[in-house]
Image: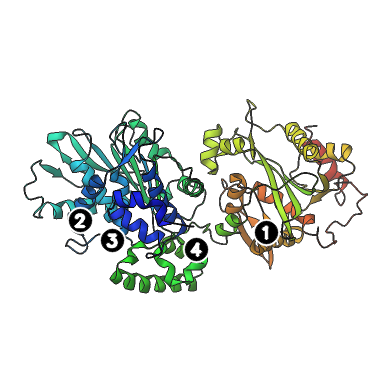
Amino acid sequence: MKFNRVDYQDVISNYNDGAMGYCLDVLEGRLLAGKLIKLACLRHLKDLKRIGNENFPYDYSVNKAKGMVNFASMIPDVSADKVLPLAKFQVFIYSMIEGWKDTKTNGARFKTVYLSMARTNGKTQIASALAIRDFLLGTPVSSRQIVEASNTNEQIKQLYNYTRKAWHALVKTKWFKSWKPKVVDNSQEMRIESSNTFLKKFSSEGTTGDSVHASTTIFDEYHLQKSTDYLDSFSSGNVQNPLAKVIIISTAGTDPRVPMREDYSAYSEQIEKDTLNNEVLFLCWEQDSDDEAFKPETWIKSNPLMEVPIMKIKLTAGIATERNKQVAAGNLPRFLVMNMNRWQNAKKNGYLPLELINKAIIPAINLNNRDVYFGYDTSLSNDDTSLVALIPYTDSLGNNRFYIWQHTWVPTRVAGGIEAKEKQDGINYRQAEEEGFATVTKSRFGTIDQDAVYNYMLDIVEKYNWNVKFFGFDRRLSNGFIKALNAYKTEWLLVPIAQGALSLSEPTKFLQDTFNEGNIKMPDDRVLKAGLSNAVLTDRNNELLIDKNKNSAKIDMVDALIDACFEGMNHYTGYSNVDQEKDDKNPFSGMKQDDIENFYMTHNSF
C-alpha cells in the first residue's frame, strides 16, 4: 500500500489530533499494523479530504474527538485502580466514533461500528468507556437507552460489572465530584431518573430487545451469534432515531458461517475496494496470515496494546506460552482465533482450514470450451441437490490447475420456508441465488423439481460448450434423471460411485492435497465456502472420508465435488479410475438385477 504524505498535507495540518497521529504512525511505518488497519487509516485521511463535497454529508470535529478522548482518559482502569494513559489505538477508536458526525442529523456518522482485536487488549475497557459516556453525556438529552448485550448472562455480566465499577471509580475523581444528576444502579441497570435514562444489560439467554429503543447498543462477543435476530431486536426499534448506533466489539470466531464472519468478509472486501458504506466503521486488528503465529515481532497487528512497552513485554511472553501450549495440544486454530484474531474453521478434524479456502478464491475464469468432470449429489427431504464441475485449466503462468463450478438447489419443505432453512443451515441462500450459485425452490410444496435440475445442467453445458468427460454420482441416492442421461447423453461417461472408503479415499485426499498445494481455485461462492468449511475428516483404517458434525451442516456440494474428483483427478496423468471401457455407458454396471429394478421403482421422476 503506497502512502504519500504530500497528498494529504492539507488535512494533516487542519485535523492534527490523536487520530491523525495514529494514522500517520501506521501509514509511515512507525507503528506496525495489518492491512485492514492501514486501509482504515487511509480511509480516514481520504474522507477528511471529501469534507464539503455535496455527496458527502459528514464532518469531522477535532474538538468532539478530543472531548471523547479526554472523557475516556478520566476513567480509572478497574484492574489497576488508577487512571492510566490511553494507548494511541484507543485514541484512534474513540476519535473515529465520536469525531465523525452526520451534518444532516448532527448525530454520529457511523451507525454501525465493527471493532475487533485479539483477547486481552482492553476491549472491555473501551466498551465500558463508550457506554458510560453515552449514558452520562450522550444524545438525545433525555430518554437515552444504552444497551450492553451479549450471548450469555455470564458474558454480559462481565462487561456490565466492569462498566458499573468504572462508574463508581469515575464519580470519586476530582472531575466528577460535582456531578449533579443522581445515578441509581443495581445488578441489572444504571439509571438517571431526572432524564429518564438507563444503561441496562441484556443477553440472548434472557429478554429480547423488542421493547427497547436503544440510542447506543454495544454487543460483546458477537462471533457466537448464529443469526442476526437478537441484534436486530434492538436495532429494529430505532428506525426513526437517526442518532442511534450499534457497536460490535468481538474477537474472531471458529464458525465461518455466522453473521459476524459474513460482515467481516464483506467489509474487508469493501474497504479494500474503497466502497465501504459511509455509515460503517470497520476497525479490525488481525494478523495478515496464519503463519505470523510464529513471528512474535508481528503480533502487534492483532494485539495493538503492544504499542505500550510494558504491555508488549507481558503480552509477548504470555502469548508465546499460550501458543506453545495450544500447539502441543493440537489446537493451533484456537490460538489463531483468540490470540491472533484470525477467523478459523476450527472444528475437530476439519477437512480444510479457512485460510486455504480463502486463498483458493479468484475471479471467474473463462468457462467456454472446457473439459469438465461432473459430480452430482441429489436431495433427500431437507438435503440440498448439488451439481459440481471440476474444470482443468492452465493459468497465465502455465501452471496446470483445477477450477470449481457449482450450483445448488435448495428445498424448503422440511425446514418450513427459506428463512428457517437459512437459519438452520447458516447459509444465505437468497443472496447466493442473486449471485448465481443457487436456486431456491419455487415449488409450493417446497421440494426440488428434478426436471428443472436436469434442464439447467443441459443449458449450462450448451451455454459454455463444455466437453463432458465424466459424470459421477452416488448410486444409492441419485434420482431418475440418471436414467434420462443414460438414454439421451450416450456420449457422456456416467459412473455410479460407491460411497465408501474404497472408492472415495483417494479423491478425498487428492482434493485436500490440491487445496494445500494451491492448485485448485474457486469463485467467491458462499454455498461452496460453507460446504468446505462444514466438512470434517474421518479416518477409517487409514482411509479417508468426509463427514459433517451435525445434521444442519451442509456438505452436499463437497460430496458432489469429490465424486467429480473420482475421475477428474487423473486429467493430467492419463490414468483412469473407471474400470469399464468408455464405450460402456451403463451406470448400473456391477449392480444385481434386483437392485436395478428396485432403483427404477423408487426413482421414477422421469
* Label at residue 410: none
Amino acid type assigned to the residue bearing label 1 in the image:
Leu
Category of crowding for the residue at label 1, using alpha-carbon neighbours closer than 10 angstroms: few (below 14), some (14–19), many (at least 20): many
Residue linked to disc 4: 333
Q: Secondary structure at mark 2?
A: helix
> In x, y percent, where is residue 500?
73, 57
1 or 3: mark nearer the eye? 3
* Label at residue 73: 2
Amino acid type assigned to the residue bearing label 3 in the image:
Ala
Residue linked to disc 1: 545
Q: CA distance from mark 1 to mark 2?
A: 56 Å
Residue at 51%, 58% (x, y): give it: 344
Between 47 and 456, which is closer to the camera in this rendering?
Answer: 47
Q: CA distance from mark 3 to mark 2?
A: 10 Å
Residue linked to disc 3: 87
1 or 2: mark nearer the eye? 2
Q: CA distance from mark 4 to mark 1?
A: 22 Å
Amino acid type assigned to the residue bearing label 4 in the image:
Pro
The reply to whether discs 4 and 2 touch (Cβ–Cβ < 8 Å) is no
> In x, y percent, where is residue 370?
79, 47
Residue at 87%, 50% (x, y): give it: 589
Counting residues from the start of the chain, the first of labels 4 and 2 encountered is 2
Category of crowding for the residue at label 2, using alpha-carbon neighbours closer than 10 angstroms: few (below 14), some (14–19), many (at least 20): some
